[in-house]
Amino acid sequence: MAEIELIQRAAGFGEKTAVEDWTGSFTYADLLRVSRFAALNLLGDEKDLGEKRVAFLVPPGFEYVALKLGVWMAGGVSVPLGLAHSPREIGYVVGDSGAEIVVFHPDFTQKLEGVLPDTGVRFQKLPEILRPARGELPGVSEQRRAMIIYTSGTTSKPKGVVSTHLGIKAQINSMTEAWEWTLEDSILNVLPLHHLHGTLNVVLCCLWSGARCVMMDGFKAREVWKRFKEKDLTLFMGVPTIYSKLIDIWDDSSAEERIRMKDYLLGLRLMVSGSAALPVSVFEKWKEVSGQVLLERYGMTETGMALSNPYRGERLPGRVGFAMPGVEVGIFDENGRLLGVEEQGEIRVRGKGVFLEYWGKPRETESVFCDGWFKTGDIAFLERGGSCRILGRESVDIIKSGGYKISALEIEEVLIEHPLIEECAVVGVVDPDWGERVGAALVLRDGLSIDLEKLRDWASDKLARYKLPTRLLLLSSLPRNSMGKVTKNRIKQSFKNSL
């Protein structure tokens, strides 16, 4: 019977601790037993889910991991939903993915009410889906689709990025080799699990290696420092904003407390930053705070991790390093010519870990590939020695804030529904802590006014909190070029001037 290699490997770790959360500590044997129950309950009378999409709205922890593996054991495709997302956003992902099963924690019942189609979707609650069950599981080929993660693109609606089991395995192999994961490792996860960073870089690499994953219910800087105090971790991964917030706590601490805080981190062998550009100031400050030299890397939902500073060797601030094991990376000009050192162009990636397709969007899938290379839309400079320095996004419609990749067009679609707004344009406003902040430039209807907090309150049930504007600019008209297209770079400059 074909079996997913990740499941086979996990079975070999037996009584080692796999997941620790606020409810307790669970071994690999516990995890696979409960995952099997989940798979059988998902199957019901079916023999194989046959790539049916299973969406789930579940907090991070043991139950989340058991459910994810259970979906795969049953032959399904996992579609994780964002806990911070609005009912409208959740409804979009469930509808677009064609999910036939939605599993949810009772705490999130209200988010699902009146949002999802009432036909063709089976709803199942935790913990009932994890109850003991008997039966046979199907064989699952690793060529099958395994996961759809929704990511904002240059269109207004997020696209579902489809990965196969083979693609996920290739990404895991690349990271565990590059960063030297072992079964002695323990990692703290504070990242959302509907993004690749948390689910694959942390959780799945951990399970592949036989390591221990300590789960927190989201990121709270003081709670993370308290967890560091136990001095039983070897790995930590975060986005630049997380390190900035941890630095803020350190800055507010006494000299004696700072000495102790630095001691908490001495046992960590690796701390990684990704999902957004790491400001050099944060890199240098964290080194002072912790004695740790952050390893910055670069990747996308579509590619997995593509570039990384070395685990052994010099880590340069403001650089994202070299191609990961098993990954090819090239810098190309707009004519598709491969460039050399001291030239800048678009990063393109190819390898077994690159995604299969955008779900249900063959044209968009075809448009992002060229001769087998995935076109990232990110511009980089290739330095002597081969290290890459990211210069920015090719598209001004993507905002990178606090590790999230946000579509400006998606936010514009919501804001234009406001009765006071005539026109709007959303851009990223450079910010030292967040990378970028969401800035909204508005043209209001005659004689009307609005303030930022009222706008955020109005939009809060339509957009996740991290997508809400934090900068506001009121204009008499939006700047446009001769073709009538809004010139967002001029709006960015206006925000800069206003600050």
Image: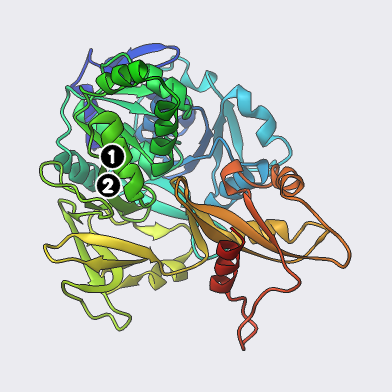
Asked whether 322 or 29 is in front, the reply is 322
Mark 2 or mark 1, which is nearer the start of the sequence? 1
Q: Is residue 3 visible?
A: no
Indicate the secondary structure of the residue bearing disc 2. Answer: strand
Q: Nearer the viewer, residue 339 or 493?
A: 493
Vertical arrangement, residue 266 with respect to residue 140, above or below: above
- 249 relative position to 461: left or right: left
Question: Neighbour class for label 2 at 10 Å: few (<14), some, many (≥20)?
Answer: many
Q: Quadrant of the C terminus?
A: bottom right
Residue at x 21% of width, y 43% of height: 175
Contact (CB < 8 A) between labels 1 and 2?
Answer: yes
Quadrant for the N terminus, please.
top left
Q: Which residue is mark 1?
A: 272
Q: How far separated are the C-alphas under marks 1 and 2?
A: 6 Å
Instruction: Tell me if residue 227 comes above or below residue 372 in the rendering.
Output: above
Residue in the image at 53% along x and 39% along y: 82
Could you tell me the amino acid type at mark 1? Answer: Val
17 displayed left or right of 365: left
**What is the secondary structure assignment of the residue under circle 1?**
strand
Question: Residue 173: which disc?
Answer: none
Write down the quadrant of residue 291 in the picture: top left
- Tag 2: residue type? Glu
In depth, the one of 78 and 318 nearer the eye is 318
Residue at left offset 42%, top offset 22%: 253
Looking at this view, name the residue that lies furthest to the front: 255
Give the residue at mark 2.
296
- Give whichever of 277, 211 is nearer the camera: 277
Q: Residue at x 55, y 68 (%)?
A: 493
What x and y, as percent, mark residue 106? Answer: 61, 23
Q: How many neighbours does mark 1 have within 10 angstroms: few (below 14), some (14-19), or many (20 or more)?
A: many
**In the image: residue 422, left or right of residue 395:** right
